[in-house]
Amino acid sequence: MRWKANPDVVMQRLGDSMVLVNLATDRILELNDTAATLFELISSGLDETEVESRMVEIFDVDPIVVRSEMPSVLASLAEQQVLSAHA
């Protein structure tokens, strides 16, 4: 599955975190480094499998950990209307 960043969302990296502002809803969301990296990878057009692989590489973690935690982060970002799923 591919995810797409909401075009109404602007982002700014601030050290190890990222601030997202949804201009359509005026919601502000701060992401930690892990979630920010995931958002950047998704925004670059990678699919879930590619993102998972890159997260394992970047953070040097077990793929099982990424595979188990990534769906909840993606769901949370979708709920906040900063990402949407596309088949």
Image (tube, grey):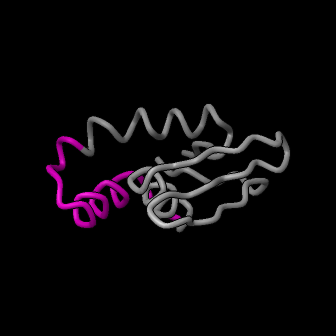
* Residue 1 image position (x, y, % from top left): 46, 47
Horizontal arrangement in the rendering, residue 40 relative to residue 48 (left or right): right
The answer to whether residue 26 is magenta is no
Read off the magenta span: 45-65
Residue 60 falls inside the magenta stretch:
yes
The residue positioned farthest toward the left in the image shown: 62
Q: Is residue 4 left or right of residue 16?
A: right
Residue extending furthest front? 15
Q: Is residue 18 above or below residue 67?
A: below
Dividing the image into 4 quarters, which one contains the C terminus?
top right
Residue 85: percent from left, percent from top: 58, 42
* Picture layout, residue 26 above or below residue 18: above
Q: Quick one: 45 or 57, which is closer to the camera?
A: 57
Looking at the magenta stretch, what is its main secondary structure? Answer: helix
- Residue lying at 27% horizontally and 60% vertically, measured from the top left: 53
Residue plotted at (18% across, 61% down): 60
Q: Is residue 33 left or right of residue 83?
A: left
Residue 14 lies, in percent from the top left, at: 55, 65
Q: Is residue 21 left or right of residue 44?
A: right
- State the residue at coordinates (51%, 55%): 39
Say above or below: 51 vs 84.
below
